Image (tube, helix red, strand yellow):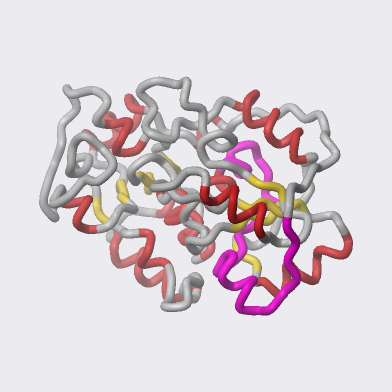
């Protein structure tokens, strides 16, 4: 099954009675890593399991891979098994940040294993509440499954490949952080401010309208096309602080019909783990 990247609250509500959709609550706050789980316990979309960014969508035993290292395929498979996922089962992820923390991350990870029946709830938890839809509280225990998955290595960008392409100037590296962090004016999370030399800035927040929903696809397409200039969508690599909000830009491009871009998962926090790698500041890449 192939579905569009986004789903509305009303569309998701219509799917719930059938029980065939796996809903995953990805709410998370960097400043309080336990808050999303507490919020899930208090209220969530009926039947939704909880995904913790640090425990389920990252593997902090991997050194040099940024603040939210991508887990390997076996570890991700164990998480999916615990949630009762099986290949082809539709997944809808949501958070409270318009998909940026960390629903888009889960959506991207599912794409890495070749799963196209995955979507992000447009507007997230806020849209669900605004629609006045049903909620439930407590812990959801899924019927565990047994699955094995593999990541598509071609969809991942490592340090060496990124550096080769940047030197050849044949990719467009888009940084999803806010302008002040991109320029290096401030850096609240990482030890060094600035950006990877050659990167362009596309703050993930620019993908959303005033209601926290994604802008129309044609508008996103115009904005990304203007930013990319001569680069095709397939030549785009996304980055951010730790490989989370980068996925939001990839999702926005896919929704806009600009397909084939990739993610540099270690992102800025991984890049600066080696002091020998160059750092740029200011607006220009």
Please tell me whether residue 206 belongs to the stretch shown in magenta: no
x, y percentage for residue 267? Answer: 34, 38
- The answer to whether any part of residue 103 appears in the image is no
Q: Is residue 175 left or right of residue 277?
A: right
Which residue of the protein is positioned furthest toward the left in this rendering? 282
Q: Residue 133: say if magenta.
A: yes
Coordinates of residue 197 in the picture (x, y in percent): 18, 40
Q: Residue at x 46, y 59 (%)?
A: 253
Residue in the picture at 75% in, 40% down: 83
Q: Residue furthest right?
A: 18
> Where is 220 relative to 58, above or below?
below
Determine the residue positioned at 38% across, 72% down. 222
- Residue beneath the point at 35% across and 23% down: 64
Residue 190 percent across, percent down from the top left: 26, 38
Closer-to-camera residue (79/232): 79
Q: Which residues are magenta?
A: 109-137
36 displayed left or right of 40: left
Residue 282 visible in image: yes
Q: Residue 185, percent across and down?
A: 13, 52
């Amino acid at each position: 099954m192939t579905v569009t990247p986004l789903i509305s609250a009303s569309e998701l509500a219509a799917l719930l009675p059938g029980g065939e959709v796996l809903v995953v609550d990805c709410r998370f706050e960097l400043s309080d890593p336990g808050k999303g789980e507490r919020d899930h316990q208090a209220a969530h979309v009926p039947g939704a399991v909880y995904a913790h960014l640090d425990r389920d969508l990252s593997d902090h035993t991997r050194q040099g891979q940024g603040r939210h290292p991508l887990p390997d395929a076996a570890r991700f498979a164990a998480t999916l098994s615990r949630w009762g996922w099986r290949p082809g089962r539709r997944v809808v992820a949501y958070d409270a940040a318009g998909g940026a923390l960390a629903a888009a991350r889960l959506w991207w990870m599912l794409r890495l294993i070749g799963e196209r029946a995955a979507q992000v709830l447009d507007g997230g938890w806020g849209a669900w509440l605004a629609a006045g839809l049903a909620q439930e509280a407590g812990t959801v225990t899924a019927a565990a499954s047994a699955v094995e998955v593999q990541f598509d290595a071609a969809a991942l960008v490592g340090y060496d490949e990124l550096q080769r392409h940047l030197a050849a100037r044949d990719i467009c590296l888009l940084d999803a952080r806010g302008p002040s962090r991109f320029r290096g004016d401030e850096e609240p999370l990482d030890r060094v401010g600035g950006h990877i030399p050659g990167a362009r800035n596309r703050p993930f927040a620019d993908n959303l309208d005033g209601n926290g929903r994604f802008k129309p696809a044609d508008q996103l397409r115009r904005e990304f096309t203007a930013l990319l200039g001569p680069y095709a969508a397939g030549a785009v690599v996304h980055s951010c602080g730790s490989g989370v909000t980068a996925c939001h830009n990839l999702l926005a491009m896919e929704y806009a019909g600009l397909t084939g871009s990739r993610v540099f998962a270690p992102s800025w926090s991984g890049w600066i783990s080696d002091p020998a790698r160059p750092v740029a500041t200011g607006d220009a890449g």
